Amino acid sequence: MSPRVLVLRAPGTNCDKETAFAFEQAGGTTRPAHVRELLDNPQLLNEHQVLAIPGGFSYGDDIASGRILGNQLRLRLAEALLEFRDAGKLVLGICNGFQVLMKTGLLDVDDAEGPQATLAWNNNGRYEARWVKLGVAPGECVFLSGLDEIELPVAHAEGKFVVRDQATLDALAASGRLVLRYTPVGEPALATAATMAPAVPYPANPNGACGDVAGICDTTGRVLGLMPHPERFLFAHQHPQWTRNGLTGDGAGMKLFENAVKYFA
């Protein structure tokens, strides 16, 4: 049987259908669910193997991107979500979904003093929509298995990964959690150490993220949050230079969804 994927949405989510389609193309069986349905029936998680939190502008990004939905999940479903992860299941947060995951505790970025990391406004204070090259260090991350670099589009205004201090960034790097980092086109992926000041200049790093971080995983490798949109590059012709580069077949983003489905094969 194909793994069942719960695609969670809230008011303002707008990438849920694309995310569901991506998992279906990879062989999964998807079910959309409004957050209210999950809050009323947390047992819904028991019927699924993957939880996907798509991109968009949940609750209009009031207060801060992803904070309202993230707080709903943390305050009402923290135990159920941790049980879901600890049962060997997968969680994926894309763009706004990454912003949500940062507030839930599922990415293991909190300690006794509070959050060790967050996602802040882009350095230029503007919404950025462009294609970026990413270096991949998959480690234990299920979704990124077999990848060493990937090109995907970003579309966000609050995607700057910020950490408490250099020691925190070093610890995340040492534990293999910094699985995706922005990389200039034409240069080796992940060629620089992770530092508080980004080593990759704009626009290759579109938001000024510390360590040039575009995505992180939890300590198990089964929870991934990333700012770029893999569901927007499922087919070669979705790339703006697909004819010039001679791209055919699947887009690079398809690999993340295929990895998730194959994990349960």
Image (cartoon, rainbow, N blue to C red):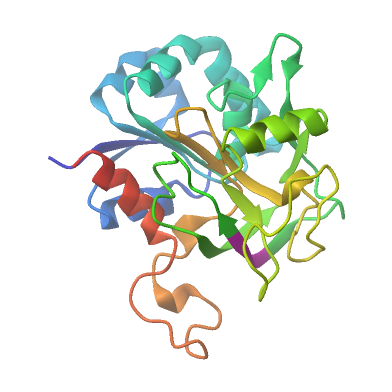
Q: Nearer the viewer, residue 68 or 139?
A: 139
Q: Residue 147 appears at what percent x and percent y?
A: 44, 58
Tell me which residue sits at (50%, 59%) in the image: 148
Is 97 above or below relative to 45?
below
Quarter of the figure with the C terminus: top left
Tell me which residue sits at (58%, 32%) in the image: 175
Q: Nearer the viewer, residue 228 or 147?
A: 147
> From the viewer's perspective, is 227 left or right of 20?
right
Tell me which residue sits at (22%, 52%) in the image: 27
Q: Nearer the viewer, residue 265 or 53?
A: 265
Residue 36 lies in quadrant: top left
> From the viewer's perspective, is 133 left or right of 15?
right
Q: Residue 143 appears at what percent x and percent y?
A: 41, 46
Residue 133 shown in magenta: yes
Q: Please provide the residue range marked out in magenta.
A: 130-134
Quarter of the figure with the N terminus: top left
Q: How many labels sit on residues?
A: 0
Residue 210 lies in quadrant: top right
Is 260 above or below relative to 77?
below
> From the viewer's perspective, is 43 left or right of 241?
left
- The residue lying furthest to the left in this view is 1
Question: Does residue 158 appear in this view?
Answer: no
- The residue lying furthest to the bottom in this view is 244
> From the viewer's perspective, is 33 left or right of 243?
left
Is 3 above or below relative to 45?
below
Give the prevailing secondary structure in the magenta stretch: strand
Q: Residue 138 appears at what percent x and percent y?
A: 48, 47
Question: Does residue 159 appear in this view?
Answer: yes
Residue 210 shown in magenta: no
